[in-house]
Amino acid sequence: MVEALRFMETDVVAIVGPQCSTVAHMISYVANELQVPLLSFGATDPTLSSLQFPFFVRTTQNDLYQMTAIAEMVTHYNWNSVIAIYIDDDNGRNGISALSNKLEERRCKISYKAGISPLSEIAQEDIMDILVKVALMESRIIVLHVGISLGPKVFSVAKYLGMMGNGYVWIATDWLSTILDTSSRVPHETMEMMEGVVVLRQHTPDSKRKKAFKSRWNNLTGGSPGLNSYGLYAYDSVLLVAHAIDAFLDQGEVISFSNDSRLWSKESDNLHLDALTIFDGGTILLNKILQNNVNGLTGPLQFSSDRSLIHPAYDIINVVGTGFRRIGYWSNYSGLSTVPPETLYSRPANRSSANQKLFNVLWPGETLTVPRGWVFPNNGKQLRVGVPIRVGFREFVSQVRGSDNFKGLCIDVFQAAVNLLPYAVPYRFIPFGNGHQNPNYDELVRLITTDVRFRCCVGDIAIVTNRTRVVDFTLPYASSGLVVVAPFKKLNSGAWAFLQPFSPWLWAVTAAFFLAIGIVVWTLEHRVNDEFRGSPKNQVITILWFSFSTLFFAHRENTVSTLGRLVLMIWLFVVLIINSSYTASLTSILTVQQLFYPIKGIDSLKWSDDPIGYQVGSFVEHYLIKELNISKSRLKALGSPEEYTTALKLGPNKGGVAAIVDEHPYVERFIGSQCTFKIMGQEFTKSRWGYAFPRDSPLAVDLSTAILTLAENGDLQRINDKWLLPSICDLDTAKLESDRLQLKSFWGLFLVSAAFCFLALLIYFLQIVRKLRRAPICSDSNGHHRNSRSESLHRFLSLMDEKADPSGQSKKGKAEGLPSRNDGDNESGESPRIV
Ligand code: SER
């Protein structure tokens, strides 16, 4: 840097120079000030921007493109995270920062950055410390962006640590191609050590001119040092400046310098800054450089608007055995290709993934199989899998008593998916929960992020927003929307079902009408119709009897008046309708399941004040409070299906709940064994169950693929069938049960009838007894005293016979000359009397 500054004390029109970005940064400030074009064929730092340094001209490739090439290779091989080992100076740091940006654009990332000090000669132990940390990481894709002196040391330590073997991927930036091209005789051991490494090299198209130059160079040097791409760019830089000065002079410009007044001050006397002069024609010369039409060894030396060389491209090289072979190219124009980029420039750019190709790579460990790019961190240890210890619905997950093993649907799916992975995943289940109640699933998921107890979670874990904010989930293996479950009640239940077809009002109005019709018909008839006459008591009875017997169309009294007949006709029609409606309604109540529970779904539940049950530990509590704004005081945690049953049976008024909100799979299990509960309304959310992993976990991606395979080959369904037995309350059985009428539906009717029978008999006997008591003792015609009570008893028995034979044909009565109740057959023609 000091040399460059000293050089600038002489009058200079252009500087071709700094081979490293750090120096380029410093000198660019001065070049700016002195208006001297600074051409660098070695400074690749992407932050050397033309806006900040207008006199800086980069005559080589910007590392931004090199990092883009690496990012595209990472996505090409389906890796998603890399480790960057870099020299911690401007060039290294800024290059890796560009790599990070380019990876993020492709949804990949640098998972670990290991900077190496550029200052002093770094000790092997320090490199070892860095690499040991790298080896403990999950990613196995290592990008090495260092200098030519440091790179080989890193590889030698990596070889020593066994990090140049199977499973690792090393991508070296162009520092390594510089070594390979320059030192024609890299020791065999060094080459073998680096076998499998993928290297980038700035691509310069093959041309006769380049070939001729190379042979001249080899003649000059005997092939050592060899010619690398930086050498070609250096040559072209000089060529470019020479052409530009020619053009400058040809244009009649004069080379002149002037003093910079700002550098003239007493304080700066000792620095001799006054020796620095401004090149008057600097801007014109800069323009001549930028707008040239020179063809160099590396192709046309043209610049794009951001002052980068046009058509940035790289060769991609694979170290194989003691040599290396090109496996393809990367160009900013069309991405990865197996043909030189210049053959593609004439065609439309095609960056489709199908068009991105590279030849096979021999990866470290001498394998052609593309490494999967990651391992379980802390190599050799088992994957710690957190599993909830469920208390209810244990068919989904349950701990095998007395062991750390688990079984259940979720476990079977996980194990089947792991078995499908193309690599072994040693894992160990870590139980989570106290065993007395379901654990909090949010807490379970959150613990993954701390990585203290376990690395991932397996179980009936719903994929919900607040969880996806902290972890990644596999693809779902079961659907689990939320539903409302409430008691399943039918209108036919209960002894008073026969009253239910009509509302109380309808009963009252119907009864009133019966009475009214009786009175109306009596009013219309009693003057002209004998049947409506008699004692007032008889008339009342007739009215009642007449009107209520119309219910069964069994009235025996004739209506003789026209008006009476009219009223009766209309009334009978009404009775017909009422009768048939009652029959229809009662039939449906008794045979069809009808719910009368006021909760019809989540909306009616939300707006009621009734308590709502939810499963302990589930996300449902948070959902009801946060999403549905239901007050926490209304929520009741329930731990098991038994608690569900009790709470629902108790109902909202007796310390239970009106309904339970839970995920579909649990509710299906629950109502499958409890036929008196039913899902009310529709599933109102569409969540799913998946397995939770730390963010960007590659295992989650592979398990997702395995779960898809299970779904497609039918294994997922088979596991479901194994664990989820069909419900015992299937629809047909329930319907049959409800079609078959039960005694309980009618005992009210029987009770009413029995009560009336009893009452009637009671009154009847009371009347008889009263009459017996009142009868006097008298003597018969033979002068014998006869106890009238025994006679009454005798008559009573006769009456009983007569009752048994209401046709009045009582032979016994007739034989004994007792008067018959049958008015028509009364021989004496007198009204019957029971005295
Ligand atoms: N499946 C519920 C959840 O994920 C737990 O019961 O929260």
Image (spheres, rainbow, N blue to C red):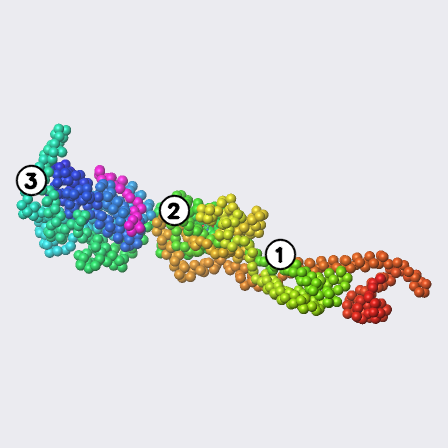
Q: Could you give the CA–CA distance between mark 3 and mark 1, rounded to whole angstroms? A: 115 Å
Residue pointed to by mark 2: 470
Q: Is residue 561 above or below residue 136?
A: below
Tell me which residue sits at (63%, 58%) in the image: 509
Q: Amino acid at mark 2?
A: Val
Check the picture and name the quadrant holding the N terminus: top left
The answer to whether residue 112 is magenta is: yes
Q: Residue furthest top?
A: 266
Residue 256: image tag? 3
Q: Could you give the CA–CA distance between mark 2 and mark 3, rounded to whole angstroms? A: 65 Å
Q: Is residue 369 above or below residue 10?
A: below
Sequence-wise first label, 3 or 1: 3
Sequence-wise first label, 1 or 2: 2
Q: Residues within 10 Å of mark 3 (few under 14, many from 20)?
A: some
Numbered-mark total: 3
Q: Position of residue 469 (x, y in %)?
A: 38, 47
Q: Position of residue 455 (x, y in %)?
A: 39, 47
User: In this orientation, which residue lies closer to the viewer: 654 or 433?
Assistant: 654
Q: Is residue 333 above or below residue 434?
A: below
Q: Which is in the foreground here, disc 3 or disc 1?
A: 1
Q: Amino acid at mark 1?
A: Pro
User: In this orientation, which residue lies closer to the viewer: 785 or 265?
Assistant: 785
**Region in magenta:** 104-127
Secondary structure of the residue carrying tag 3 is loop
Q: Is residue 65 visible?
A: yes
Residue 504: image tag? 1
Residue 146: image tag? none
